[in-house]
Image (cartoon, rainbow, N blue to C red):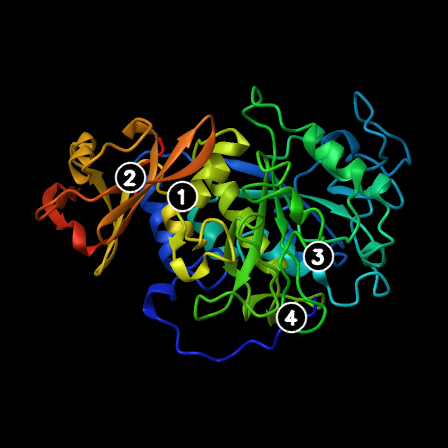
Amino acid sequence: EHPEKARIVNRPRVFADHSVPATSRSDRAEVERLTKAGDALVSVLVGVVDTGLEQNDPFFEGLLAVNEAELDAEDRKDDDDPPNDFVDDVYGVGLASRDGVIYSSATDNPQGHGTKVATIVAAGTDHEAWRSTFPDAGPLLKMVSYSQQWLGPGVDPTVLALAPKYLRREGAAVVNMSLSSSRDTVPLSQEISASEDPELPDAPLFVVAAGNAKSGRGKQLGPHRVFPALYGGRSGRMSETVVTVGAHNGAGELAGFSNYSSELVDLLAPGCSVKTRDQHGDVVLENGTSLATAAVSFTAALVRSLGLDYPRRVKNRILASVDYDPDLGSAAWSSGRLNMAKAVSLRYDVLEDGSGIRFGRLVAPGAMDDLCRDRPDPALDNVRKVIPKGERIEFWVEDHQRLHKRECRKAEGELAISFELDGKLVDVPLSDVRDLVPARL
């Protein structure tokens, strides 16, 4: 990574809980509330394609999915039935050696990149607090290790393509790829495309990094060719199953080092001074789109664990729940920052106004018709996000599993949204509403 030096800023309160890595206290509290309300969380397998872990790192004990077929002995045989072309792949694989060595060397991974990313995917440095609250939930990791020396023009697309193929076979629901190459790795894209089956609810969602500038400012994707980042966004050729993630800083702005695009980047996530662990097990502050990508992967795993299936639906949920900021329109097509607490509220409507975020029930959702002089299209049960914009209202609707932005003219008069909070009915003036995200389940 070659990020900008993180600036010290006084962060606006609205960003305070969500400009840190994946599991802030408010995020855990919201997931705990949902669980107590009857949502049974289950573990979800997340593939991490990166530079590997540090050997015998106790932090990851119990966080790595175990392949029982290969557990008994390192016999240099492929004991899987049917064979998967890797030997002794207990916790994952090393692509170069075609075996179960998921650990990195000082030569291949001098900065401990894989450990830093995997820490965030596994719920962050405070994962023990997460596990104590939800002992049977959260991601289990399956590691795919590659040499950092492969990055850049010399990346071997044939070997790298083994990663999605292997992880799809292992049943990964989410695949984190915090890597980049200037080459359109055709074998890799073919393997990702093989996962784009709308009839498979458990197909993996690929979460990839937009990439960082090696020097100076980040660049616009499209003219600047970075793969697999160009596969995602709104117009990437694999946008059905690929989420491309840029980074924002502590002020909620596009991080100076982060690549960006109004078409090819989906959203931004925390990428400056992110607390994680290095190759020595020390807690450090790290910058980069790699860390932002890992936070989105963790969120995607939680959404899957709460019962939302199909990769496109999970992607749409994460995008519809962003903190919308019109100033980010050129940075990502959603113009938004990751908000994990909103994303996981699958059974409660989320309303944000000047007092903060409220989780409750939208009363008579059909009444949203009354907000417009002309009805939004298509039907209101497909609405995934509502953003009042003065005299106009923006609706994000899901049509044929894709998100589309629609607008209508605001109806005349004093308008309000009726919302049930803890058994009490409140009318929130539309002029106070910043964002409304209907429940997804």
Q: Which residue is mark 4?
A: 3
Q: Position of residue 5 (x, y in %)?
A: 60, 77
> At numbered mark 4, what does the secondary structure look like: helix, strand or loop?
loop
> At numbered mark 3, what does the secondary structure look like: helix, strand or loop?
helix
Instruction: Say which label, 4 or 1, has the lower sequence index.
Output: 4
Instruction: Pick whichever, 71 or 394, lies toward us.
Output: 394
Amino acid at the residue labelled 1: Ala
Amino acid at the residue labelled 4: Pro
Amino acid at the residue labelled 3: Gly
What label sits on residue 348 in the rendered view? Answer: 2
Give the Cα separation between the discs numbered 2 and 3: 35 Å
Give the Cα separation between the discs numbered 1 and 3: 29 Å
Q: Are marks 2 and 3 in contact (CB under 8 Å)?
A: no
Q: Position of residue 286 (x, y in %)?
A: 61, 69
Q: Which residue is mark 1?
A: 320
> At numbered mark 1, what does the secondary structure look like: helix, strand or loop?
helix
Determine the residue located farthest toward the bottom in the rendered image.
Answer: 8
Q: Residue at x 62, y 59 (%)?
A: 220
Instruction: Pick whichever, 278 or 218, lies toward us.
Output: 218
User: How many circles with numbers are drawn on the protein?
Assistant: 4
Q: Which residue is mark 3?
A: 114
Crowding near pointer 2: few (<14 within 10 Å), some, many (20+)?
some
Instruction: Say which label, 2 or 3, has the lower sequence index.
Output: 3
Instruction: Pick whichever, 68 or 376, lies toward us.
Output: 376
Residue 425, image quadrant: top left
Amino acid at the residue labelled 2: Tyr
* Left or right of 100 on screen, residue 340: left
